[in-house]
Amino acid sequence: EVQLVESGGGLVQPGGSLRLSCAASGFSINTYNMNWVRQAPGKGLQWVSYIRSSGSSIYYADSVKGRFTISRDNAKNSLYLQMNSLRDEDTAVYYCARAGEIWGQGTLVTVSS
Amino acid sequence: DIQMTQSPSSLSASVGDRVTIACRASQSVSSYLNWYQQKPGEAPKLLISAASNLQSGVPSRFSGSGSGTDFTLTISGLQPEDSTTYYCQQSYSVPLTFGQGTKLEIK
């Protein structure tokens, strides 16, 4: 079964760091473009970051550029999002997605003192 | 950045009705337009890709059309389980951008 499972969310203070993981099964992440998308409580969807299947291209939303880093471990078939210098406005459910067709269940990140 | 604007933001319709949701891009996205359905507490579900390509397993009452800057999602024969929120998204260029969402309610 093709599946994505996120983990690593939690409560963190402003200025803190968190690393999200997305474990893929049923397919190889290095053969698909992968995205991180977030959704603040009660709000719409916001794209966060993208990594091309080849790894040759990586993009970020302006709101996270310089603070977040997307990466992947092909051996572990996992996608990651390293989030540093977290702000209140980063509070959201974070989803990993295979292009737009397969989504994980999401992991909640709460930034609060 | 390409701005995506959905209309209406919310609507109410009856079971069996034909419903149309519009999505307009601030510049051409060719046919790089996806439609998602999201139920409360769940991840978005891709309904339609490339403006009109119905995803496997999605009921045929859903359809999409358009190209360039103007797109529509149509539900023909509304069902109670269709009551939820719908988003359009352009995948033409980075940053990938979503519409603000359309909340569909059943009368």
Image: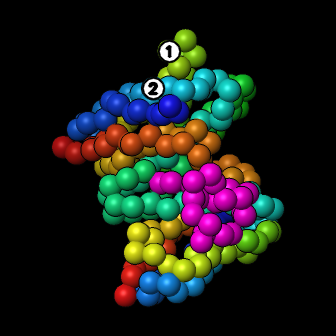
What type is the residue that disc 1 sits on? Lys
What range is drawn magenta here?
B44-64
Tag of residue A76: 1
Q: Nearer the viewer, residue B55 or B101?
A: B55
Q: In the rendered structure, does residue B62 fall within the stretch colored magenta?
A: yes
Host chain of mark 1: A
CA gap, disc 2 and disc 1: 8 Å
Number of other residues with Cα within 10 Å of mark 1, as a class: few under 14, some 14 to 19, many 20 or more? few
Q: Nearer the viewer, residue B57 or B83?
A: B57
The image quadrant of residue A111 is top left
- Which secondary structure, mark 1? loop
Asked if disc 2 and disc 1 are in contact, CB closer than 8 Å, the reply is yes
Circle 2 residue? A23
Residue occupying image coordinates x 47% and y 54%: B44
Quarter of the image containing the C terminus of chain A? top left
Q: Position of residue B80 (x, y in %)?
A: 40, 75
